[in-house]
Amino acid sequence: DVKVTQSSRYLVKRTGEKVFLECVQDMDHENMFWYRQDPGLGLRLIYFSYDVKMKEKGDIPEGYSVSREKKERFSLILESASTNQTSMYLCATVRVGGLHYGYTFGSGTRLTVV
Amino acid sequence: AQKITQTQPGMFVQEKEAVTLDCTYDTSDPSYGLFWYKQPSSGEMIFLIYQGSYDQQNATEGRYSLNFQKARKSANLVISASQLGDSAMYFCAMREDRPYSGNTGKLIFGQGTTLQVKP
């Protein structure tokens, strides 16, 4: 089975800190995604990557950046954390040829910015 | 623009009864895929069922079935014989397929419906 690992389950950071959320997958999937989940809003796409060093903005990229230096790792960066970035962050991967079966998700990182 | 709408923030169902979770979508593309995911309180996202826009029959996976009404642009999830373990949040999602411009696999999600199963 594909495994998608997010480095932290819970994280508390201070306003203004630079925050790194890491996502690692072990099955050579090309495409990786970062979402944030908020009550009543569902999952909203922040950024995605379809290859090493390739990235595209999602629906809510403001305040975030990403890095994909290796195929298996996709990092989400909060350049200067703010309280409105307190949320659940979910990483997901998909194999281009396996689109029929949708995403494989990580277990999520619940980030609190104080 | 593509959009997914789940109009039921919360639902209750009695154990062993069937329940339908509503989902409507909007897209101008002829080719797309529809998904349902389950998220228990633990937070993990579990894939339940998939329906392709060209599939002639409604998808079924065990106790889950997808009531696909293409003309109405609805993709409701039906859970038969509800169990206590079905209590969770459920998300409907859509993927647009663009074989000539490159598929990204990107999904857009609805707001979610919280289902509680009563014993």
Image: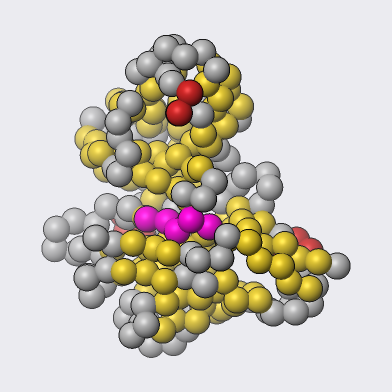
Residue pushed farthest left? B100
The answer to whether residue A5 shows anywhere in this view is no
The stretch of residues the image draws in magenta is B108-112
User: Which residue is the extreme one toward the right?
Assistant: B119
Residue B32 makes an appearance in the image: yes
Q: Main secondary structure of the magenta part?
A: loop
In the rendering, at what x and y percent does residue A16 appear? Answer: 42, 12
Image quadrant where one finds the C terminus of chain A: top right
* Rendered residue at 80%/72% (across/down): B15
A12 or A75, which lies in front? A12
Front in this rendered view, residue B37 or A84: A84
Residue at (51%, 34%) from the top-left corner?
A87
**Could you tell me how many numbered marks the image carries?**
0
Residue B119 sits inside the magenta stretch: no
Relative to A7, is B89 above or below?
A: below
Task: Please say if B99 is above or below B31.
Answer: above
Residue occupying the point 61% across, 27% down: A10
Q: Residue at x 66, y 66 (%)?
A: B11
Q: Position of residue B55 (x, y in %)?
A: 37, 82
Extreme residue toward the bottom, this view: B56
Q: How is the image coloured?
A: secondary structure
Name the spot of residue A96 as percent of width and height, x first.
Answer: 31, 54
| Residue B109 falls inside the magenta stretch | yes
Please state the horizontal and vertical placement of residue A74, each as a whole percent of the image: 38, 31
Vertical arrangement, residue A43 with respect to residue A87, above or below: below
Pick whichever, A93 or B114, lies toward us: B114
